[in-house]
Amino acid sequence: MAHNPSETHWIRLAGWAGLLGALLVGVGEFSMQFTPRGGIEDMTSYLYFNDISATRLSFGHFTAVLSAPLYLLGYYFLSKQLEPAGRLQSKLFFLIGAYAFALGTAWIGQRFFIASTVHEIANGQALSGLLSLFSEHNEPFVNVLRLAMLLVSGLWIKLILTGRTHLPKWMAVFSPIVLLAVMAGLYFFKTKIGLYVFPVAMNATHFIVFGLALLTTRPPKALT
């Protein structure tokens, strides 16, 4: 189904908004979570936060939280590129992605408070119980986000391989779950680039996905 020029303009604008969101959330999350010594996989003591200043945490918190809703526009753009291959499935793709990043916003919004608690513990405050409570109520959000990425990746691959979307078939390779797995592998195999991309893996993944989708969108093939 072709879009009229005006509608296409707004759809692509949503894509650019998603790309900007991935970039800005990445900047914010990198500011909050990157440390040259690594350790971001620690989801109990969060000791890596002790290497990050309060100024960096505050900057990253506001940058990431205020930018995260732009992901919803990015997923709207992607869903419109998938729509010719199946309207219902493309809507499902959008709903799962939008729900995931609504939870992702809640998750990233709590990182500042976890980090601040870690700083207080380092300064001698007896807050380990509070830190555990924060962790128990924060980490489930990112786990749901990861599960959602698995589901949207399945839809992404299935719909693109039909050949009836606005995207070339090779874009099926660039599904979120594949890119996330690559970045996790780069980190856990101790590569230098992995140290830098893993703290912002979700954002780097979507910067690639939104960017390639904007560069490669084309009219759908006629249905037969």
Image: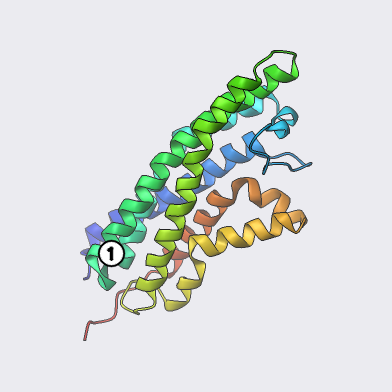
> Which image quadrant is residue 81 in?
bottom left
Tell me if 49 is positioned left or right of 67 in this view.
right
Looking at this view, is 183 or 135 the one in front? Answer: 135
Q: Nearer the viewer, residue 100 or 134?
A: 134
Residue at x-position 59% and y-position 51%: 201
The picture places residue 165, in percent across and down from the top left corner, at 32, 73
Residue 220 x %, y %:
29, 76
Mark 1 Cα shell of 10 Å, populated few (<14), some (14-19), many (≥20): some
| Left or right of 187, for residue 152 | left
Q: Is residue 191 left or right of residue 1?
A: right
The quadrant of the image that shows the C terminus is bottom left
Asked if residue 186 is positioned above or below residue 1 in the image, the reply reads: above
Q: Identify the residue at image location x=67%, y=44%.
A: 41
Q: Position of residue 181 (x, y in %)?
A: 59, 61
Give the total number of marks visible in the rendering. Answer: 1
Asked if one can make out residue 86 in the rendered structure from this viewpoint, the answer is yes
Seen in the picture, residue 103 relative to 112 is either above or below; the reply is below
Residue sitting at the far bottom = 224
Q: Quadrant of the N terminus?
A: bottom left
Q: How is the image coloured?
A: rainbow
Image location of residue 193, percent across then percent down: 72, 55
Q: Which corner quadrant of the image does residue 119 belong to?
A: top right
Residue 69 in sight here: no
| Residue type, label 1 | Gln
- Mark 1 lies on a secondary structure that is helix
65 or 24, which is in the foreground? Answer: 65
Which residue matches tag 1?
Answer: 89
The picture quadrant where one finds residue 12 is bottom left
Which residue lies at the image location 51% right of the left edge and 67% below the top edge?
174
